[in-house]
Amino acid sequence: MKASILRFVLKRIALGLLTLFVVSLLIFAVTQALPADPAEAILGREATPEALAELRAEFGLDKPIVAQYTNWLTGVLSGDLGTSYATSTPIGEYIGPRVSASFFLLLIAAVGSIPLSIVIGANAALRRDHKFDTTSSLVSLILAAMPEFVVGTILTIIFSTTIWQLLPAVTYLEVGAPPWSDVKGLTLPVLTLLISVTPYVSRVMRAAMVEVLESDYIEMARLKGMNERTVLWRHAMPNAVGPAFQVIALNLAYLAGGVIIVERLFNFPGIGSALADAVRSRDLPVIQFLALIIAGVYVLTNLLADVGTVLVTPRLRTRLK
Amino acid sequence: MDQQKIETSGLSRRHFIQGVSSVALAAGVFSASSLNASAASAPGKKGGTLKVGVVGGSNDLFDANYIVAKADQARLMSTFETLLTFDENFVPVTANGLAESAKQNSPTKATVKLRKGVKFHDGTPLTADDVIATFKRLLDPSKKTTGKPLRTFLDPSGLVKIDDLTVEFNLKAPNVDFLASLASYTYAIAKVGYDGKTQIGTSAFSLVSYTPGRESVHKRFKGYWDAKNVYLDEVRIIDFADKTALVNALIAKQIDVAVDIPFEQYKTLKSKKYLNVIENSAGAWLAFCMRIDIKPFDDNNVRQALRLLVDRKQMLNRVLSGHGKIGNDLYGYIDANYNANSYEQRKQDIPAALALLKKSGYSKANPLKVELTAPDDTGGLVLMIQTLAEQAKKTDGVVVINAKVIDGGTYWSAKGQYMNTGFYTTYWSGRTYLAQVAASMDIYPETKFPPDSSSFRADYLKAAGTANAKKRREIVAKMQKEEFEKGAYIIPFFNNFADAYSSKVKGVVVRPSQLNMDYYAHGFKNISLG
């Protein structure tokens, strides 16, 4: 069985790499279709033909399009991510700290929201139509309907600018300092992400749990006289958590891109503002790298969810043989 | 502060401007009258770190001679200094500048003498060679600088070193306004060999680190020539991707200064006891451009009809929450010769606009349909085109304006909407009249005005070479008449700008100035925390 799972994982990794390659091709094609090349976008209204020519030569934009792409690709494959056009800094140096900061934010949001939503969802299913269920359903419906920037803005008004001045309104990280160096400043962005993700996942968890609890094998277990706790954790949970994994994966993948809004709101030095700026200045190496990172998170979370689902679901585990 | 004025022997421009501006002030025309031109609270305590927040991102620049955003201005001003600076009447003076004296000997010649003992942050002394190298860089078209306007009247060969501290500027075309160029903040002096990459200036604070899109750190420079007027130990210029986050950070006391606050937040910030809000105007303007060589704007009836279509007061209220001055399609607000013919304020006049359009054959059956564009990255321009499109509806279908918002990267690029289409928008900082004519006519020919048949260009050259202020005013009046009657800019207003800062921050000067925080307090000189 182990070998079959390994085969499954390897196949998925290969597919993932293919996805990344296609994404990089697509992004390259799209950026070529944008009006204004990087030199024009960067120079703006101060452009002179001489300055344009100089900048184009510096970026290698005077080479044929195919050569530009293959140069970039061979660079990436050999570990050279290139240099940002707009900031003239190597991608690793410029984007590296931002990627880790964003990942940290994402990780905290994931680590917080996964158990929280599973517990809320499972409890709501167990106490179906009782007070906890109706209240949590109502609250999660309301929260799920609010976009992140509304949640973030409300939190800021409550906790840092208008009602109380308890927490910082923005995250201020000294350059070079790790993201956890400003714990207070992280509170509101993390809270915003938690509130944006948890309701969604807990609703799915509840639905899956309700379905499982009504199934024949749970009925059987109960009839055998097993205590409710064993029924729930040993028999119901593994089967309900599978679908939840998929939703969690989708949510995390969404967050990798959606974190942009939260970062902007709290001036968090992550990939969000870097990507927006890069598109504006047609900073191709940065766009490509960030697109790959975001697509990579997508591929990876989906892979983990699939593997996780297979591992926890006996039905799927046996089918792999 | 050094109140020494510049000698302008032979030319009475300074005297003239001062005389006229006091008259203008009395008439309520000049911006200072409406601003609380209060004296600043005096700086006192030594030490501390000033945190300055400004909207910026990874596309920001750090250069002595080039900027695109406010963050770039803040960093330039914190690191570099110009030969001259402007006083509150926009007269070039030596205060806070690197020149000890500057003299315009004739319309084609000026001499600048540098202060003694000025050092760069690396300890090397400032000399005439650095000044010449800086201006050569500005004159080089292959370099990314804002030097374009200089190239019309100065060649590198005109820069002459007289001695270690004296430079002579020999102009190839007359320009009685030349000393104003030396006060232009992007013509800041860098070292010989400056490549735009290593930021070594002469300011009160030297650069420690700069991380694009994050922050720059500047520490007190011990060798500064005016060290007795420096209080802070450190200045941090912090980038904010969003204005709302910037304002929130100030309210939550995470930063000391918020540069360029949105006017929607003006009242909220003003109501906070622990904050100060200052407002400034320096003749900066936003405008609609009509290309006189592109149909239908080649028809003067169309241009003048569109000018009459604008409800300027409504536009000012909508775009800037009223924080500005209504414009009359004339620029050069800070010039003593602004509106030299004393034209009455142009107002929305739909019947007059329709009458003009009828002359050109436009009617409900044959409407004037035009596309108007604005970039998404310049505050106010988007609201401006949307407002104009709405105001055009008052013509009952005779004028139909299709307002389109374009991504900034595309809009400003060489083939973008800016300068390449018939009807679009632009922004300018305040300039004196003739300097703006030069910029709009040749350097950024946004409207292609004047037409070849006009005497406007000849008049400009005559005015730029006329030392006698009264005679020059007469020529300027004639030029403005042509622009008022046949011009191609619609200038609905001059925009103000505002900054907010913690009441702990002392020494902020409130007076008319072209940049936020009174030229970023000349690199945060004279500012203290408490």
Image (cartoon, rainbow, N blue to C red):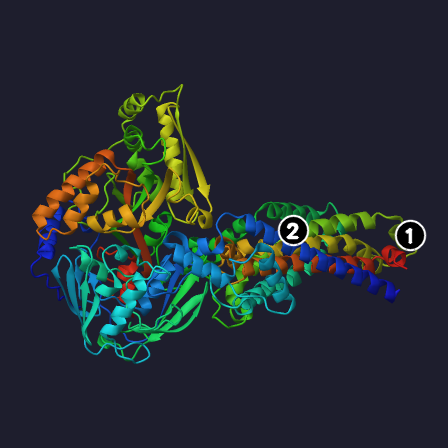
Q: Is residue A209 left or right of residue A105?
A: right
Above or below, B427 against A309 in this view is above
> Helix or strand or loop: what does disc 2 sit on?
helix
Residue farthest front in this picture: B157
Q: Residues within 10 Å of mark 1 (few under 14, many from 20)?
A: few
Mark 1: which amino acid? Met
Which residue is label 2 attached to? A199
How far from the left and from the top, in percent, is residue B283?
24, 49
Q: CA distance from mark 2 to mark 1?
A: 31 Å
Taking depth in this image into account, of A227 and B407 the one nearest to the observer is: B407
Mark 2: which amino acid? Pro
Above or below, A75 against B272 in this view is below
How far from the left and from the top, in percent, is residue B149?
28, 55
Please indicate, yes or no, whether residue B525 appears anywhere in the rendered image: no
Which residue is label 1 attached to? A220
Quadrant of the rendered structure where residue A302 is?
Answer: bottom right
Taking depth in this image into account, of B151 and B184 the one nearest to the observer is: B151
Please indicate, yes or no, whether residue A73 appears anywhere in the rendered image: yes
Q: Is residue A91 left or right of residue B241?
A: right
Of the two numbered discs 2 and 1 on the same chain, state the one appearing first in sequence.
Answer: 2
> Helix or strand or loop: what does disc 1 sit on?
helix
Residue farthest top in this picture: B365
Q: Do the dots labelled 2 and 1 sit on one chain?
A: yes
